[in-house]
Amino acid sequence: MKSRQRIVGITSKGQATIPAEMRRRYKLENRALIVDTDKGLLILPPPKPEDEMGSLKGLFNKKAGELLKEARRKDKIRERALEEL
């Protein structure tokens, strides 16, 4: 992959403009993810909710939607048991 480099200005408020061709290429719109690495800053498209990024990823073998459905099902069972009392 060919490396593309551009020098951009930074305002007194710390804002830098990402060149339009790079924004289009990497589908950067309103937001971007900035990662501080040992070699410098890495700019990435923001993660999508379905990408399941987060500190709890990997702790469960199920997706969030499946866990929610299961919790709701258990709540309904408890509610029915309380109603029978």
Image (cartoon, rainbow, N blue to C red):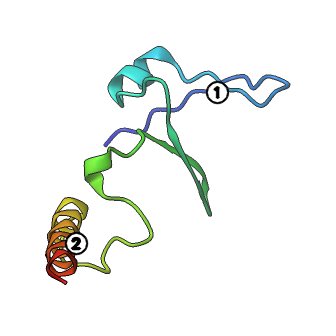
Q: Give 33 or 5, whichever is nearer the viewer.
A: 33
Residue 5 image point, x, y percent: 52, 32
Q: Which residue does the image show at 14% across and 80% down from the upper left? A: 84
Q: Is residue 24 left or right of residue 73?
A: right
Residue 4 is drawn in which quadrant? top left
Q: In the orientation shown, which residue stands out farthest toward the top?
A: 20
Q: Which residue is mark 1?
A: 7
For marks 2 and 1, give the CA distance.
56 Å
Q: Give 41 or 77, whichever is nearer the viewer.
A: 77
Q: Amino acid at mark 2?
A: Asp
Residue 33 image point, x, y percent: 50, 43
Q: Give 6 or 58, whichever is nearer the viewer.
A: 58
Q: Earlier in the sequence, mark 2 or mark 1?
A: 1
Q: Give 71 or 13, whichever is nearer the viewer.
A: 71
Depicted 57 relative to depicted 31: above or below: below
Depicted 56 relative to depicted 4: above or below: below
Q: Amino acid at mark 1?
A: Ile
- Image mark for residue 54: none
Q: Which residue does the image show at 50% across and 31% down from the upper left? A: 31
* Element class at badge 2: helix
Q: Which residue is mark 2?
A: 75
User: How many other residues sit within 10 Å of disc 2, few (<14), some (14-19) or many (≥20)?
Assistant: few
Residue 57 is drawn in which quadrant? bottom left
Q: Is residue 78 left or right of residue 38?
A: left
Mark closer to the observer (2, 1): 2
User: How many other residues sit within 10 Å of disc 1, few (<14), some (14-19) or many (≥20)?
Assistant: few
